[in-house]
Image: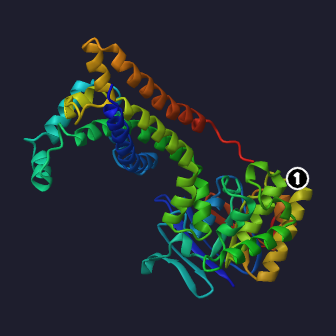
Amino acid sequence: MTLEVSMALGERGQLDVAFRVEPGITILFGPSGAGKSTTLAGIAGLVKLDRGVIKVRDEVWLDTEKAIDRPVHTRRLAMVFQSLALFPHLTAEDNVAYGLDRALSASARRARATELLGQMQVGHLIGRRPATFSGGEAQRVALARAFAREPQVLLLDEPFSAMDRKLRSELGVLVRVYVDRAKVPAILVTHHRQEARDLGDRVVMMERGRIVREGGIDVIE
Amino acid sequence: MSWAPLILSIQVALVSTLIAGLFGILIGYSLSRRETPARDLIDVVVTAPMILPPTVLGYYVLVVLGRSSPIGQAFEAATGTSIVFTPLGAVVAAVIGALPLVVKSARSAFEGTDATLVKAARTLGATPLRAFVTIELALATRGIVAGLMLGFARALGDFGVTLMVAGNIPGYTRTGSLAIYDAIQAGREDDALGLIFALTIIGIIPLYLATKLGKPRHDA
């Protein structure tokens, strides 16, 4: 599964990028304001792009020339936000079940949510709401919710930036295991060099809405 | 002492709260969206009944919905009854009083919902409608219900606009507030006391619930 992205936004060319992402973890690296999060939002369909093409394997999500622009909910992706965006009124189980295939029976959805929470080592949170989670627990539930979607592309918008290195490493392992097993591309936005080195396979470096370098993880000095 | 005015007041308040709820949620949601055009103007128009004198409001309603107005005539041609000087007029008057409270509460509740949650729902496969119902509306429910409670309490006690629009016809449009006014004017204070206590109790309970619901929820 590969993701091809080419997108532009803004009359003054605030964002103009093109890159290709293979299965594995690609780091979108750069300083604040480089356009990293906007790029993710563009892939997800959360911002309206002036022009662009987004393809996942043979599936076209966006092609402005051909007036193709698939709505967000039909793009099979999962996004973990910096704030995690766990639904505060839903339990951990319901948060995870939210993105599951709605064709599944209620009991199958519950079973799958329970299984995923167990895999993330937060099975004990099943009936609890996010306000009672620790930071690390919330991260794990957010990852379980993202994995439940069985995405073709996994988008991670600085979800680990506030974590210490040990916890980040533990969560990184969970992402790594999922990405390797599902063979999907994941894009992780960060401006922390260490996090990029710890978690990434490849790097796309951005500055002021442009790609300035890309390649292996050693691109980051 | 007749309880008919109190029963009419409760009926009018219930129906008008339902109507104010339907429109109030829609208007409150629209006002919470930045992309809605003329938000400030709509807000002023919806909020105006909170500050305009009831006689002024009543006059406008008579002009727009009275028997000689196009709307009033069309309604009468279709149903055989007029809007003004009927219980329906009392409902219209009560809706005008309740609507701003519902709109304000709904708007505030929707604006308090983190927009990222909706984005997250969309990326998890939710259609715009599902995201609205399961996230935005669900999270705004407490605020909306608080607004409905306030709207009900306000509708229950409407006096000025009701008098202008529905009149004070005994056994037909005489609500609890109007009956109290009538009894006091006629020196029948004892007749008014029962209604006064009943309206106080029925009005205070939703007010108390609205205050409880208005407090932040501590999830556990």
Is residue A97 visible in the rendered image? The answer is: yes
Identify the chain of the residue marked 1, using the numbered disc in the image: A
Query: Which quadrant holds the C terminus of chain A?
Result: bottom right
Is residue A160 visible in the rendered image? The answer is: no
* Most foreground residue, A126 or B199: B199
Above or below: residue B200 compared with residue A78: above
The residue sitting at 50% across, 41% down in the picture is B108
Helix, strand or loop under label 1:
loop
Above or below: residue B105 compared with residue A193: above
Q: Quadrant of residue A90?
A: bottom right
Left or right: B203 as drawn, with respect to B209: left
Location of residue A74 in the rendering, given as x and y in whole percent from the top left corner = 55, 76
Above or below: residue B14 compared with residue A97: above
Left or right: B174 as drawn, with respect to B128: left
The residue carrying pointer 1 sits among few (fewer than 14), some (14 to 19) or many (20 or more) residues within 10 Å by Cα, namely: few
Location of residue B71 in the rendering, given as x and y in whole percent from the top left corner = 14, 48
The residue sitting at 36% across, 32% down in the picture is B6
* Most foreground residue, A49 or B102: B102
Seen as rendered, the residue at the extreme front is: B1
Seen as rendered, the residue at the extreme left is: B68
Coloring scheme used: rainbow
Above or below: residue B51 compared with residue A98: above
Left or right: B36 as drawn, with respect to B52: right
The residue under label 1 is: A164
Number of on-image labels? 1
Location of residue A189 in the rendering, given as x and y in whole percent from the top left corner = 72, 62
* Most foreground residue, B101 or B162: B162
Location of residue B27 in the rendering, given as x and y in whole percent from the top left corner = 38, 47
The residue sitting at 68% across, 75% down in the picture is A153
Query: Which amino acid, mark 1?
Result: Asp
Q: Quadrant of residue B9?
A: top left
